[in-house]
Amino acid sequence: MSFTRTWAITRKELLHIVRDRRSLVMALGVPFLLLLLFCYALSLDVDRIQTCVYDQDRSPESRELIERLAASRYFDIVQNAANLREVDRAIVSGSAMLAVVIPPRFAARLLARHPEPVQLILDGADSNTASIAQVYALNVVSAFAAERFHVSPSVDPQLRVWYNSSLVSRNFIVPGLVAVILMIIAALLTSLTVAREWESGTMEQLLSTPLRPAEIVFGKLAAFFVLGVADAIIAIAAAVWIFDVPFRGSLLFLGAATCIFLFGAFSWGIFISSIAGSQLLAYQMGLLSTFLPAFLLSGFIYAVENMPLPIRMLSYIFPAKYFVTILKASFLKGVGLEVLWPSVVFLSIYAAAVSTLAVRKLRTEVA
Amino acid sequence: MSTPAVSIVGLTRRFGDFVAVDDVTLDVARGEVFGFLGPNGAGKSTTIRILCGLLAPSSGAAKVVGFEVGPQSEQIKSSIGYMSQRFSLYDDLTVEENIDFFAGIYGVPHAKRGQRKDYALTMAGLTGRRGDLTARLAGGWKQRLALGCAILHEPPVLFLDEPTSGVDPVARRQFWDLIYDLSAAGHTVFVTTHYMEEAEYCNRLALMYRGKVIALGTPTELKRASGVATMEEAFIASIEKEEAAA
């Protein structure tokens, strides 16, 4: 490979990038927008559960139970029902997710040490939220029972959540999101670059010169790398300073891993661009082949461990999965190469393999 | 005479059942302006693309400045300048940036870059417009800039594939003046065209029809062989003879 020729390509690509203002703004602005959008749209935290109460007892004890619910940030009492029909309507219409029905003589029976059921009605249409709401409601009710009537379970588990002690979903979504966004942006940026040269006829001109396919591929890669690193810095900085995600790992390690990841992602874009031949097809292939696996199979939200075996196997070939692991661990657990080396090794193999494939593909075009 | 600039023996290229180049044999001497005349689809571009290493031949052999097409394509690529029908410049780069880019990929030594750039700018008549975006140039200037970029590395052989298509007659005439200058400076120019009047400008030319070279010689020889006055008539006569023989 000749440095002079490779540099000529890199410089030309950088000029394309700078000249195309609209794409440049997109390339730098889109990661930030996606981060903002996903972060708020994808919040998995369940709080302010809309709750309807039907207090048939109206005793100080029943009111205290309701006040405890109202005081918790997880519940929002939206309605005091006067009868069961109103409870039913609240759940059916969706104005309440949870209904708490306190039976008549609730206080009297409890004071007489009789076990007394409190009915919790949940809207199971959204099963995830419902099951979380159920746990929260049970906690409030049993805490109430334990304190007021000394009914306590014989084993008292003391919970301690590591790494994300407040269990804020943002803390685990945002680091994974950085990987998804970089994967999409990287592949889309490069997916057009070779296809455009085929369409405009300049590729034929390039191939008639002493340029080698590897010089074209790596020259282009180097130019997009500048953009990719800028995007990575924007995304990581936004995660730390705007979304307040704690960063506990080594910036140096994460930086190096990001570079390896970007190298692979850009190579994939260039490879797609060479096989597609047209910009439109390249764009669609780029979006499809990065967005879906990065979103669904990377473990960024959906736990891959719970998926059926064939899909689990499939998830191993996508680089986003490894980068999500690295990002989450760097942000939340503060571990580095000593733990994450298998992911780094995979990302390196992926980058080497895909860039080789891209060069090969371009070489076979000359036949 | 030294080794010919281009030497083609039995060159054939098939695309499936279609024979784009059919058993072409010819030599081009150094310093010659050699023309390929023929209608669209006659196989002119395909032949040039094979000689430039952009396409592999199905059979036959060819040499460019003594290097074998195929095994020695690296050496060939350093010795040729290629200008395709589409003047493959980058529209979003300035005139000067396009020249710098091609100087870079042709590996023009840094010491010679300034001089070669000035030469290309002067030749294209764009000295005062080096900072203009290429997209803003009119066809004739774009075409001369493309030629300037293709000769930055002083290649012994130039392949010009329909370099004057889509350019007005005045610009076309100016472009041919450039071709003569290059030829006088020792470059071999291999040019395709479908304009009859341009064929007259060539030292020697091959008439190509359906993948075959149906006549070869100087414009005067070709006209005399058919006993006609114009190139167009000579071409039609050659085609009729070919059709009758088939």
Image (cartoon, coloured by chain):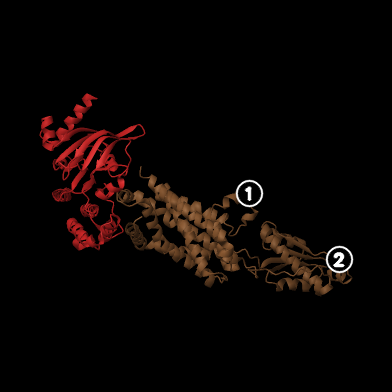
Chain colours: A brown, B red
Which marked residue is nearer to the observer: mark 2 or mark 1? 1
Query: For the point 65% across and 70% down, which residue is it?
Result: A165
Task: Using the image, tell me which numbered label, if any, was put on residue B44.
Answer: none
**Percent position of residue B162, x then y:** 23, 44
Query: For the point 86% across and 66% down, which residue is it?
Result: A115
Image quarter in which the C terminus of chain B is found: top left
Residue A245 or A204: which is nearer the viewer? A204
Q: Give me the C-alpha separation between circle 2 and circle 1.
A: 46 Å
Q: Disc 1: which chain?
A: A
Dot placed on the residue nearer the N-terminal end, 2 or 1: 2
Determine whether B65 is above or below A291 in the image. above
User: The residue under label 1 is which amino acid type?
Assistant: Leu
Query: For the point 61% across and 55% down, which residue is it?
Result: A304
A200 sits to left or right of A76: left
- Tag 2 near tag 1, CB within 8 Å: no
Element type at mark 1: helix
Element type at mark 2: loop
Residue A290 or B2: which is nearer the viewer? B2
Determine whether B107 is above or below B158 in the image. below
For disc 1, the marked residue is: A309
**Percent position of residue A170, x then y:** 59, 66
Query: For the point 71% across and 72% down, which residue is it?
Result: A70
**Looking at the image, can residue A239 be seen?**
yes
Task: Using the image, tell me which numbered label, if any, was put on residue A115.
Answer: 2
Residue B75 or A100: which is nearer the viewer? B75
User: The residue under label 2 is which amino acid type?
Assistant: Pro
